[in-house]
Amino acid sequence: MSTSIAIDGPAGAGKSTIARLVAKKLHFIYVDTGAMYRAMGLHFHKRGIAPDDEAAISAACKEADISITYQDGVQQVLLNGENVTEYLRTEEAGKMASATSGYADVREKLVELQKKLAASENVVMDGRDIGTVVLPGADVKIYLTASVETRAKRRFLELEEKKIPCKLEEIAADIEKRDYQDMHREHSPLRKAEDAIYLDSSDMSIRQVSDAIIDALMEKLAKRRVPDRNLEGALEEIIKKECGQI
Ligand code: DC
């Protein structure tokens, strides 16, 4: 029996930082589903397909073989056998992912892959529809958000550090636009699952957010009838570390 933590929320809320940290602490696998939509976007871009050509997108979907492997615990995405991980954060992949992730054929294909991964491994999975569509039975569901102002500031500092020129107001406007697109699309719009825990990270540290998630999992596991020995070991280790025993 595998255990899963679903983390959904808007762009820039800190989902990947938190999901990666929680997965590391628990010895779970971190599944970044946004990277899969980006790989699909890259596939369409490479083929010169216009993002509004739904028929061509559906046909190209059938020729995209996307799979996930792990190198030193870091997710690698293979597109038709080629490791495309380093290209996923490019502007082209991001724009194409955003424009095509609303299509039913794209979602169907990637949701199937995500469900398969979670069936065999303990996972922390982040995205937009994990608690609502991909893993409706997840052990813990989190809806992680932060104010537009906070998210824009975080992104601004990130870009500034990389010496990429940017304007705070433009970043904030872009975030608002992406939120609207994610929340109002026809298929699997971003929304909080009814049983998800709502966390606003605007005034929380990374540590506070990850602790809240691990606490929620511990509470859940305490109610489980059949204990998971591996998981208990990992949790015990965390508790000992917190108490300075190791
Ligand atoms: O989180 P991200 O920026 O890497 O996501 C890339 C795009 O994929 C973004 O436009 C939202 C979309 N996405 C989605 O529709 N469903 C998911 N489960 C994950 C990402």
Image: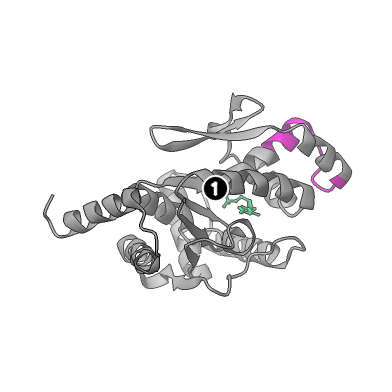
Which stretch is magenta? 42-54
Q: How is the image coloured?
A: one colour
Q: Is residue 242 left or right of residue 168?
A: left
What percent of the width, then of the height, locates residue 42?
68, 36
Q: Is residue 140 left or right of residue 170?
A: left
Q: Residues within 10 Å of mark 1 (few under 14, many from 20)?
A: some
What percent of the width, then of the height, locates residue 2?
46, 51
Residue at the right extreme, as displayed: 55
Q: Which residue is mark 1?
A: 119
Is 208 or 236 nearer to us in this picture?
236
Q: Is residue 220 left or right of residue 37?
A: left
What percent of the width, then of the height, locates residue 130?
58, 58
On the question of residue 155 being in view, the answer is: no
Residue at the left extreme, as displayed: 245
Residue at the front extreme, as displayed: 226
> Quarter-wise, where is residue 205 in the image?
bottom left
Cβ of mark 1 under 8 A from ligand 1 = no
What percent of the width, then of the height, locates residue 246?
13, 49
Is label 1 in a helix, a strand or a loop? Answer: helix
> Quarter-wise, where is residue 242 in the image?
bottom left
- Please state which amino acid type lies under the numbered disc 1: Ala
On the question of residue 154 being in view, the answer is: yes
Position of 30 relative to 75 (above/below): below
Residue 51 in magenta? yes
- Residue at point 39% right, 64% down? 225
- Residue at point 62% right, 24% down? 81
Q: Is residue 225 left or right of residue 39?
A: left
Position of 232 relative to 194 (above/below): above
Position of 106 relative to 175 (above/below): above
- Residue at point 14% right, 60% down? 243
Residue 214 in magenta? no
